[in-house]
Amino acid sequence: MMTKGRILYIEDNLESRILIRRVLEAEGYTVIEAENGLEGLNLAVTESPDLILMDINLPDIDGYECTARLREINSFRHVPIVALTANALSGDREKALDAGCDDYISKPVDIDRLPAQIAYHLNGGSG
């Protein structure tokens, strides 16, 4: 079966990684996992994902910093980065977008909507 795309999920919570991986693999995506920001940066460079799901509250460098560092690398200027976080405070969405994220999805994630949200960004933000 051909994969729909490679998704890097940077998330320190194991249960969240398992849930999202199951949902996305069932939709035909290949999921690469990192449990902290520095591992995520390394895997992004070595695995060349088509899209990155970024938790904001990471144990080493936070998702904002990780996103900003990725955006400094030419090959990641146009890779969609979607913040996936429990931060639902006013201003968090703007902070994620300012850091370079293309979208912001609040936890708990609506797993029925997630595949369509991923497909939207993989199709260049259309359809």
Image (cartoon, rainbow, N blue to C red):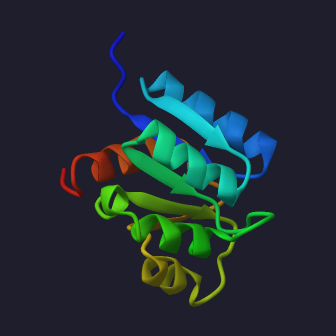
Q: Looking at this rendering, what residue extends furthest in the bottom direction? A: 91
Above or below: residue 74 compared with residue 44:
below
At 65% across and 77% down in the image, what residue appears? Answer: 88
Residue 113 appears in the picture as rendered: no
Pick whichever, 57 or 113, lies toward us: 57
Q: Is residue 108 left or right of residue 60?
A: left
Q: Quadrant of residue 74?
A: bottom left
Residue 122 appears in the picture as rendered: yes
Q: Residue 31: horizontal and vertical position, in percent?
A: 53, 33
Q: Residue 1: horizontal and vertical position, in percent?
A: 36, 9
Pick whichever, 8 or 38, lies toward us: 38
Q: Residue 73: horizontal and vertical position, in percent?
A: 39, 64
At 67% across and 50% down in the image, what residue appears? Answer: 39
Q: Residue 38: horizontal and vertical position, in percent?
A: 67, 57
Q: Is residue 55 left or right of residue 59?
A: left
Total marks placed: 0
At 65% across and 68% down in the image, what residue appears? Answer: 56
Q: Is residue 16 left or right of residue 67?
A: right
